[in-house]
Image: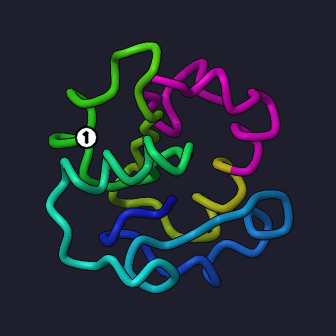
Amino acid sequence: MLDENMPPRSAFPRLNGHFDLKHIDHDLSRGGLKDAPVYALALSSRRIIVTLNVKHFKPMAGEKVGAGVIGVPPHWQPRQVDTQLTALLIKHGPAYFQGRYVALGEEGAA
């Protein structure tokens, strides 16, 4: 699930080709939600949050039953995010991210 601060899912064609990608605002019409309800929505819908907002979401990840959070470097262009995030999600199954924070682009992430 793409957080509100991310481009719409159309900016990530590879990711869309492999996964059921949804944007919190553009697809789910839930823009403007505070971070905790976004996290709860990800948890209840069994989705991983992809966000630039690492500061607020990173502390929420950390329980085995929690939603996964993937932090995106703010300077990355959508094409780079599309390539790296697709590779990361293909490499690891959804269970790998459950309750875990992963920083995209850090050594060992992809």
Image coordinates of residue 15 in percent, x first then y, are 73, 62
Q: Is residue 5 above or below residue 70?
A: below
Within the magenta stretch, is there residue 93?
yes
Which residue sits at x=68%, y=32%? 94
Image coordinates of residue 25 in percent, x first then y, are 38, 80
Which residue sits at x=44%, y=49%? 42
- Closer-to-camera residue (46/109): 46
Residue sticking out furthest to the top: 64
Image coordinates of residue 27 in percent, x first then y, are 52, 82
Q: Is residue 91 above or below residue 5?
A: above
Q: In the rendered view, how is the structure colored?
A: rainbow
Which residue sits at x=45%, y=20%? 65
Residue sticking out furthest to the front: 44
- Closer-to-camera residue (98/54): 98
Q: Is residue 51 above or below residue 20?
A: above
Amino acid on which disc 1 is placed: Phe
Report the side of 109 relative to 70 (left or right).
Answer: right
Q: Residues within 10 Å of mark 1 (few under 14, many from 20)?
A: many
Q: Quadrant of residue 99?
A: top left
Q: Which residue is mark 1?
A: 57
How many labels, in total?
1
Report the side of 36 relative to 15 (left or right).
Answer: left
Say what secondary structure mark 1 lies in. helix
Within the magenta stretch, is there residue 98?
yes
The quarter of the image holding the C terminus is top right
Range covered by the magenta-colored residues? 86-110
Report the side of 107 relative to 17 (left or right).
Answer: left
